Image: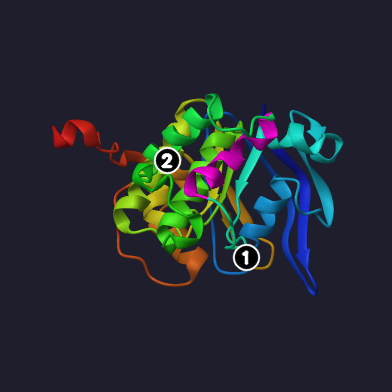
Amino acid sequence: MTLSTRALTLTVPGRTLVSGLDVQIAPGQCWAILGENGSGKSRLLLALAGLRKPASGDVQLDGRPLAARPRRELAREVGILLQEEPEVFWGSVLDYVLLGAFPHGRLAPGGAPDAAAREALAATDLAGHALQPYRTLSGGERQRARIAQLLVQSPAHVLLDEPLNHLDLRHQIAAMETFAALARSGRAVAMALHEPWLAARYCDHALLLYDSTRFSAGPSSELLAREALERLYGCPFDAFADPGSRPVPIDRAAHTS
């Protein structure tokens, strides 16, 4: 299934953020959405998830408008990691991660959801925190728990709004490896990032949101060049590795053996 926009326009009071956007996010692709603060990245992800109605145009999943799909059915196809969420949660980290199984109608621990949740906790380096109260986690640990919850949801289309927030460098790399692996497994991944060097390493497609409703979309090997990024952010960049020859993620198991 392909998630696509058709003549999408997004606005805030008194200002147009994105106008006439046509883009297709296909299975197996990993997209980086880059732009300055206020350029419309979060609004776009909310529209792609069916959580924010665009000013005009629409978002479709395999040619069918998102609004035509029941919410639980849509949640099995499209999942989103929001930039912010309420911090209050009564239960353990395992309880929190298990909420990702809700669209599939399986909330009770002890069956497949419990196993999937524990696997997701291990993948996000939280296995030892399963029974810890969620409210006692640090900001970075809470962000990893939110990623784990999305892994349990296991949607075909994964949308991530600044997923590296609060993460230290090691966990930033681990998270990007996880997202790239999801794309390699056939899922469609799109994420808003403020780290173009990580986008160049892990994402094969990019969407650059400029001011005044301008945008560019295409292969990251073409768009994530130094000159384009300097135009996007309005500041000089030091040269970094050519996105077309970005390094392969390290096999950490082999590296530590």
Between 78 and 21, the residue placed more toward the observer is 78
Residue drawn at x 65%, y 51% as measured from the top left: 45
Write down the residue under mark 1: 39
- First-in-chain label (1 vs 2): 1
| Residue 96 on the magenta span | yes
For residue 59, which numbered disc appears in the image?
none
Q: What range of the chain is rendered magenta?
A: 92-104
Q: Main secondary structure of the magenta part?
A: helix
For residue 121, which numbered disc appears in the image?
2
Specify few, some or many for label 1: CA neighbours under 10 Å numbering under 14, 14-19, or 20 or more. Answer: many
Q: Which quarter of the image is occupied by the N terminus?
A: top right
Q: Secondary structure at mark 2?
A: helix
Q: Position of residue 64 (x, y in %)?
A: 81, 31
Is 181 displayed left or right of 40 in the figure?
Answer: left
Is 138 displayed left or right of 232 in the figure?
Answer: left
Between 176 and 142, the residue placed more toward the observer is 142
